[in-house]
Image (cartoon, rainbow, N blue to C red):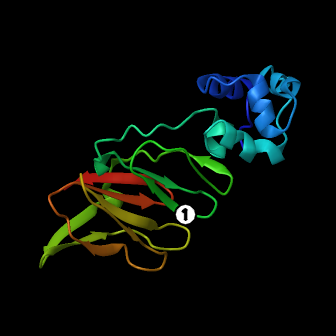
């Protein structure tokens, strides 16, 4: 991992709960001097204490490691605020409907930032019956391919996973308009309003 628990994070989270060093130490079966050492960066928690420490501080282990508490501010339930993440190790596609701290394969993943499509990544949208046929003229080899296509509106999220050596196409119901996203494993995330 890129990070480890910092003393400042432990102290800030502990004080946010109005907990003394002694109270935290009691929950973890360590001495208050141990907590003091962590908070003054003269020592670090043993890896076996990460989960109990996170639980005592009311955060997840990734939040504890990053030092940032994730608070859900997406109370409006607008799925257009969704974030997409792709693991560079296993290719896992992850989605959150608001701010989140996402990790996969031991890596904290940044939220993907979409850009407008260029001529090599243009998406064609064709009405067919009560759906739309989406296609991208793009190489689909194991080395270079479109990984997924997503449609997001204020109340709808639909993801279609694509695979190398298949076709970069799918059918979707684009109810009420929204945003289409598609991801090239070499060039990143693209977006188009529909």
**x%, y% of residue 101?**
54, 44
Which residue occupies 87% across, 29% down?
A: 31
Residue 22 horizontal side relative to residue 113, left or right = right
Residue 74 horizontal side relative to residue 85, left or right = left
Q: Is residue 117 visible?
A: no
**x%, y% of residue 81?**
33, 45
Residue 121 horizontal side relative to residue 16, left or right = left
Q: Observer-nearest residue: 8 or 90? A: 8
Q: Is residue 147 visible?
A: yes
**x%, y% of residue 99?**
44, 42
Q: Which residue is mark 1?
A: 92
Residue 54 horizontal side relative to residue 183, left or right = right
Quadrant assignment for the C terminus: bottom left
Q: Observer-nearest residue: 193 or 37? A: 37
Give the quarter of the image for residue 42: top right
Q: Using the image, determine if residue 39 lies above or below residue 157.
A: above
Which residue occupies 49% across, 58% down?
A: 94
Which residue occupies 76% across, 24% down?
A: 21
Which residue occupies 28% across, 62% down?
A: 123
Give the quarter of the image for residue 24: top right
**x%, y% of residue 161?**
42, 71
Mark 1 residue crowding within 10 angstroms, few (<14) / some (14–19) / many (20+): few
The kind of secondary structure element at disc 1 is: loop
């Amino acid at each position: 991992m890129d990070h480890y628990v910092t003393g400042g994070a432990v102290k800030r989270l502990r004080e946010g709960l109005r907990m003394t060093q002694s109270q935290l130490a009691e929950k973890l079966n360590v001495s208050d001097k141990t907590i003091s050492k962590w908070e003054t960066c003269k020592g670090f928690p043993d890896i076996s204490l990460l989960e109990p420490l996170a639980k005592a501080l009311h955060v997840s282990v990734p939040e504890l490691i990053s030092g940032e508490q994730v608070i859900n501010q997406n109370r409006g339930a607008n799925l257009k605020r969704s974030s997409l993440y792709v693991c560079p190790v296993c290719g896992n596609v992850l989605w959150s409907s608001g701010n989140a701290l996402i990790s996969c394969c031991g890596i904290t993943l940044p939220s993907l930032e979409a850009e407008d499509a260029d001529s090599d990544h243009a998406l064609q949208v064709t009405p067919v019956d009560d759906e739309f046929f989406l296609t991208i003229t793009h190489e689909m080899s194991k080395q270079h391919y479109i990984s997924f296509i997503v449609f997001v509106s204020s109340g709808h999220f639909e993801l279609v996973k694509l695979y190398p050596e298949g076709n970069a196409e799918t059918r979707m119901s684009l109810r009420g308009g929204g945003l289409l996203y598609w991801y090239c494993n070499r060039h990143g995330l693209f977006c188009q309003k529909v």
